Image: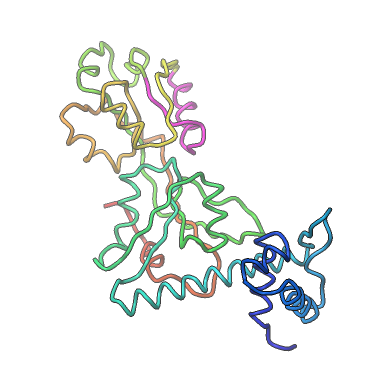
Amino acid sequence: MAPLNYRHLYYFWVVAKEGGMARAAERLDVAVQTVSAQVRELEQSLGHALFKPAGRGITLTEAGQAAMVHADQIFQLGEQLVASVREAATGQGQRLAVGISDGLPKLVVRHLLQPALQDPRVRLLCHEDEFDRLLGDLALHRLDAVLSDRAAPANPNLRLYSHHLGEAPLAWFAPAAMAAKGARTFPACLADLPVLLPTGHAAVRPRLEQWFERHGLRPRIAGEFEDSALLAAFGRSGMGAFPASQWTREELLKDKGVRLLGETPDIVEHFYLISAERRVHHPLVQKLLPAGRAPG
């Protein structure tokens, strides 16, 4: 089999991205006939049609969709290669692009990323988004890794790998003035206080609700937050009692206006690093996965 012609692949990739031959030709600043000929040669070399008519335009065939997955990976890696060479040549150090699931506690994120940040030349790019969208960006190699509170779901098309980084029990905190008014001990006091919770998108939310049921609690929910840092900020400002990871305990208690209500060792948050299958393993991602790692 003849080696793949990457110019042909690039023209195919641009056509698929632009949604048509004419728009691809405009982007590439070449004639439409040139684009069409390049794509046709790629189809001949692969032995399958990559596009089919769709109304007045074209769309990918199943073979074209499969080719597009690999083309995306190839050209994303190509962009990373250029950036890596430039950074190495200019002494800028390595770049690490990490997706942060929006429900993950920010202080926990800092802890999890610390092993990769020992070299002061590391350039860290953190992108926070919804879990599913981050997995899509990871599959396309726009991200080097994703940090989340859950493992990636099984999907043979994405080929993602979940690495368990650790776990931490939750504890409950409250504004000091609010905690001082509580007449009952923990956890019964939560029935007397306004409570702040993560929204249902957080993996720990069902565990919290089950814990309430086990203890016969029906708290008054004063607020629900997708962002864990925002949840803690509103709790610290006096809005209500709130749960947070034990890994953030020391940082939260630096605030004299916050008091620890009690610990819940039976409610555990899990933390994962999700990586994509690829030939080149990012050395900084590997630093996040030392054997036997435990919270510091």
Q: Which residues are magenta?
A: 195-215
The structure's colour scheme is: rainbow
Q: How many marks?
A: 0
* In this view, 109 is above or below 186: below
Please give the name of the residue rendered at 52% of the width and 46% of the height, measured from the top-left corner. Answer: 131
Q: Nearer the viewer, residue 10 or 210?
A: 10
Image location (x, y in percent) of residue 45: 77, 82
Looking at the image, which residue sits at the far bottom? 2
Please give the name of the residue rendered at 43% of the width and 47% of the height, measured from the top-left corner. Answer: 128
Q: Nearer the viewer, residue 19 or 145?
A: 19
Please give the name of the residue rendered at 41% of the width and 16% of the height, measured from the top-left corner. Answer: 219
* In this view, 233 is above or below 62: above
| Quadrant, the N terminus | bottom right
Image location (x, y in percent) of residue 117: 29, 62
Magenta region includes residue 212: yes
Left or right: 221 as drawn, with respect to 139: left
Magenta region includes residue 249: no
Instruction: Please identify the quarter of the rendering in which residue 89 is found.
Output: bottom left
Image location (x, y in percent) of residue 54: 82, 56
Image location (x, y in percent) of residue 21: 73, 66
